[in-house]
Structures are given as C-alpha cells and as structure tokens.
Amino acid sequence: MNLNDLQNISENFGNTQRMPVLFLGHGSPMNAIEENQFVQGFRKAATEIPKPNAILCISAHWFTQGTKVTAMDMPRTIHDFGGFPQALFDVQYPAPGDPELAKETAELLAPVMAEEDHNWGLDHGAWSVIKHMYPNADIPVIQMSIDYTKPSQYHFDLAKRLNKLREKGILIIGSGNIVHNLRLIDWRNINTVGAGWDWAIEAREKTNNWLLDGNFQNIIDYQKQGTSLQYAVPTPDHYFPLIYTLGLKDKSENLTLFNDELIGGSLSMTSVRIG
C-alpha cells in the first residue's frame, strides 16, 4: 500500500476509533425473518460497537475464482436459496453500495488482483444478518468474495491487508458457520438449541478452545485436526469467513464468543467478536 492509497481512504473516512471485527454464524436464511436468540445476539452486537461508516462483508455465499469486490451504487438483494416461504423472498435490504470503498479495498489487496464487480449484490450471508444489526439500511455495504482456488493460510494472510480499513470506521464482517454440514442435519431438531451430534460437539469444543487460546494455526490447519473437523467442515465455504476474521486480529485485542450454540445436529451458530 502506498501513500496515495492511504490518502484516498482518509479523504472518504476520517480516522476513527479502531473498529471491532465480527464473525457471525448466520445459520438458516429463515433467521432473516424469525425472532430468536441468535438474531437478538446480532442486534446486541451492533449496540456494543460504534456505528460504522460502512461495512465490508465476506460471505460464505460468494465463492469465486479469483477475488472480487462489489462496486455498484445500489447492490441488489440476492435470494440465493430455494424451498423457503414467500415471505423470505419478499425481503429487500436496500443498503447503498460504495464504489470508492470497493476501489480502495481492491488497492489494499495488491499485489493480489481484485476485480471490481457490478453483477453480484448482497447475498443472504450478508443481508440476513446485517438487516438485524442495522435495520434502516442506511450504512453502505460492500462484499468481498472468497477465492475457492486458494488454501486457508492464503486467506488468513490476505485478510491482514484489510486492517487499515478498521481505522476508518469500516466494520468487517465474516459470515458463515464454523460447524456446517447440511448433509447430516437432524431435521427433527433443526430448531432445537443445543442439539448436536457427538462429532459436532467435539468440533465446537476444539475450535472454541483454539479461538480463546489464540491457537489460530490449528484453525487454519483444520484438515489436520481429526475426524470431527472433517465432518464439521466438509467444504470450506462457510469456514473461510472465520479465517478472514482471525487474520485481522492484533495480538493485543480481546476475542469473545457469542451465540455459541449448536442446532440441528450439524450446525453451529457460534459467533466471534475481536476488539
């Protein structure tokens, strides 16, 4: 990053108190329209941090070849799911975008080439949680995609290049689920808080301990951590947003957990705040 990059960011957003970083376990899209302890947790998290100038969301649901950043003025609300009630498809979250922030984010990622995207919008990994935090849709939101061709260490290291945004009032949110195995859901307990298969309980306990102990390398090397993690993370799409969140943590910052529950046997709603 050069002096021109810093100047561009400074012109748009003045220096602020360093913003926290969040990883939100977003769970089912139905959380967008249901009232439960998890959406209450999202709202509470918003009350405990300064109101951001803008939001950068890294969602499990934008998995691409290469890295992209949404750069449109008004991102569309994407209903990227099926089989849910019409009320969920009727939800719109008309938050503005921020093309200048998108450009500056792409510049911060250099030498990684990040494409400014004008086609995507806000997928449900973003809007289903942000709508509870900021229901007036008055904060600009951009998304950054996850390059599926790269390993977890790459994403952890790439996240560090975004740290300057935190000093300009940008709230960075990773949205996914640490334990996320849709093939093994216990549908009888899909809404039962605390319901988890033995492997899911073990995976949650392991990852929580690593998070609280600051043992991020074990989290990055999740594929080496035994059977429970293999079941918990059968594909990395919902897991990598956590990796981005952890890559933004300074050694001096606190890390706390909230919404820390299993549901449906094979999903965890565990969420993380840094700072």
Image (cartoon, rainbow, N blue to C red):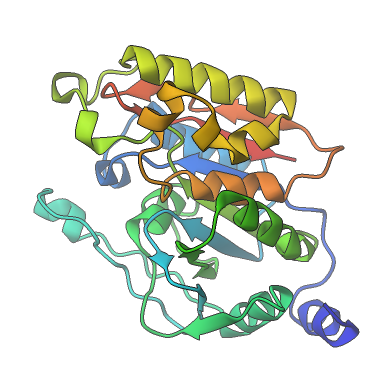
Residue 71 showing in the rendered view: no
- 27 and 115: which is toward the camera: 115
**Front residue of 126 and 14:** 126
The reply to whether residue 15 is in sight is yes
Q: Quadrant of the N terminus?
A: bottom right
**Image spot of residue 261 (x, y percent):** 43, 21
Report the residue at 58% width, 63% height from top. Answer: 56
Instruction: State whether residue 205 is above or below residue 132.
Output: above
Q: Quadrant of residue 93?
A: bottom left
Vertically, is 142 above or below 4?
A: above
Q: Is residue 172 above or below residue 198?
A: below
| Residue situated in front as seen by the camera: 3 or 46 | 3
Q: Position of residue 11 (x, y in %)?
A: 80, 83
Judged left or right of residue 250, residue 43 is left
Question: Quadrant location of the C terminus?
Answer: top right
The structure residue drawn at horizontal position 14% and vertical position 54%, both measured from the top left corner, is: 82
Report the number of numbered marks.
Answer: 0
Left or right? Give the position of 49 relative to 131: right
Q: Quadrant of residue 183?
A: top left
**Could you say which is closer to the camera, residue 178 or residue 231?**
231
Q: Is residue 137 left or right of residue 231?
A: right
Which residue reaches farthest top? 198
Residue 7 drawn above or below residue 212:
below
Q: Residue extending furthest right?
A: 3
Which x, y percent locates residue 40?
44, 33
Residue at image position (40%, 42%) is 26
The quadrant where residue 79 appears: bottom left
Where does the image place residue 60, in percent across and percent down from the top left?
42, 53
Residue positioned 64% across, 51% down in the render: 153
